[in-house]
Amino acid sequence: MQNIVLIGFMGTGKSTVGKRLAQSLAWDFVDTDYEIGEVTSLSVSEIFRRHGETRFRSEESIVVARLSQQERLVIATGGGTVLNPLNWNALAQNGTVIALHASLEAILARIGNKNDRPLLKGPREAIEKLWSERQECYSQADFIVDTSQKSVDEVVKEILIQLERMTKNEFSEVAKD
Ligand code: S3P
């Protein structure tokens, strides 16, 4: 069985949903930002501040290459991970890619004034531009779930139903729960 890869903009719920989904499937959950933190002993913000985005992206690609070799992982990626086609290909070759979508309003409301995302520090216009530019990339996923108005459990349920359809009942027992 391959991996399940969650992609999408910051604040769409990839980590929260990913953890719950992994629990439902009794699979392991991994978060690329967390893994980068483990390898570098730095937070995402610190890497950006001390070494710049280029270094962050390079650490991210190393983590992606490693995780893509494994199986039965639910992988929550960072919002920019799959913009690199090499990362996309590695993840998609060994996994089902699911995009979590959310409206900009829902994202801004969820994120509030949390200060741990370097790319969300700019004005609303800059965030909106980034959000718009990335939609085309995220839309290439195997399927998309809109999380704007849904609870975590509702999103997980929808994912399980879609996976069941795609994989000819492999996930049917879990989707019924
Ligand atoms: C980023 C998203 C972040 C993190 C980094 C860059 C992006 O992850 O990887 O701040 O480029 O969208 P989340 O999507 O988990 O916030």
Image: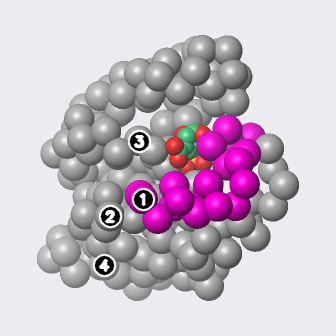
- Alpha-carbon span between mark 4 and mark 1: 26 Å
Provide the residue span drawn in magenta.
116-134
Q: Residue at x 41, y 21 (%)?
A: 58
Q: Label 3, on which residue?
A: 81
- Say whether residue 18 is left or right of residue 95: right
Label 3 Cα crowd, 10 Å radius (few <14 / some 14-19 / many 20+): many
N-terminal-most mark, 4 or 3: 3
Vertical placement of residue 153 versus 23, above or below: below
Vertical placement of residue 177 versus 54, above or below: below
Front-most of 64 and 58? 58
Q: Position of residue 29 (x, y in %)?
A: 49, 46
Say whether residue 73 is magenta. no
Label 2 Cα crowd, 10 Å radius (few <14 / some 14-19 / many 20+): few
Q: Label 4, on which residue?
A: 162
Q: Are marks 4 and 1 in contact (CB under 8 Å)?
A: no
Badge nearest the viewer, 3 or 2: 2
Q: Is residue 26 visible?
A: no
- Alpha-carbon span between mark 4 and mark 2: 21 Å
Instruction: Name the dominant secondary structure of the magenta segment.
Output: helix
